[in-house]
Amino acid sequence: MSPRAKLRPAAASCPCGAAVPYRDHCGPLHRGEAAAGTAEALMRSRFSAFSVGDAGYLLRSWHPSTRPARLDLGGGLRWVRLEILETTGGSAVHTEGTVRFRAHYLERGVPGEMEENSRFVRDGGAWTYLGAV
């Protein structure tokens, strides 16, 4: 976790919306103790990484062909809720998939949302974020 990461209480629900604690859901992926088994799982873990400020995980889970050299998570956004709207492919037997989602945030106390249809591909067997469709 990056030094700028926001600490979450150990028993808090995962930012991605899972009804289990962050430490047991997306935390193991962020710590490198587990890998996402599906494109949706990677999407959820990436949302959680934005929520807790883990730029290192975001860069590690980004496909090398589209990964930026660095990532600044400043800017005053607080990511608060994720909705998965649709998935195609992206299962344990696929090599690519898409996840359409809506991410809710607060910016200086004002609510907002962004929607994206993200493309995921396997790289060396692991799911990676390629970019928006």
Image (cartoon, rainbow, N blue to C red):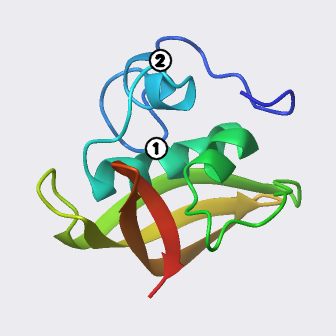
**Residue 132: image location, x then y, percent:** 50, 82
Relative to residue 55, is residue 8 depicted above or below? above
- Identity of the residue drawn at 55% across and 31% down: 30
Q: CA distance from mark 2 to mark 1?
A: 12 Å
Which of 26 and 10 lies nearest the eye of the viewer? 26
Q: How many marks?
A: 2
Q: Residues within 10 Å of mark 2 (few under 14, many from 20)?
A: some
Q: Residue at x 37, y 66 (%)?
A: 121
Left or right? Give the position of 82 relative to 71: left
At mark 2, the secondary structure is: helix
Q: Earlier in the sequence, mark 2 or mark 1?
A: 2
**Left or right: 35 with respect to 70?**
left
Residues packed near mark 1 inside 10 Å, few (<14), some (14 to 19) or many (20 plus): many
Image quadrant where residue 75 sits: bottom right
* Amino acid identity at mark 2: Arg
| Mark 1 element type | helix
Q: Residue at x 16, y 57 (%)?
A: 91
Q: From the image, tell me which residue sits under label 1.
A: 45
Q: Residue furthest bottom?
A: 133
Return the x and y of residue 100 as percentages of the image width and height: 35, 75
The amino acid beneath tag 1 is Ser
Indicate whether 31 appears above or below 35: above
Q: Residue at x 57, y 73 (%)?
A: 113
The quarter of the picture where the N terminus appears is top right
The C terminus, quarter of image = bottom left
Horizontally, is 103 left or right of 64 in the view? Answer: left
Rendering quarter of residue 8: top right
Is 59 on the left or on the right of 96, as rendered?
Answer: right
- Label disc, if present, on residue 23 of the rendered structure: 2
Whether tag 2 and tag 1 are in contact, CB under 8 A, the answer is no
Residue 54: x percent and y percent? 70, 39
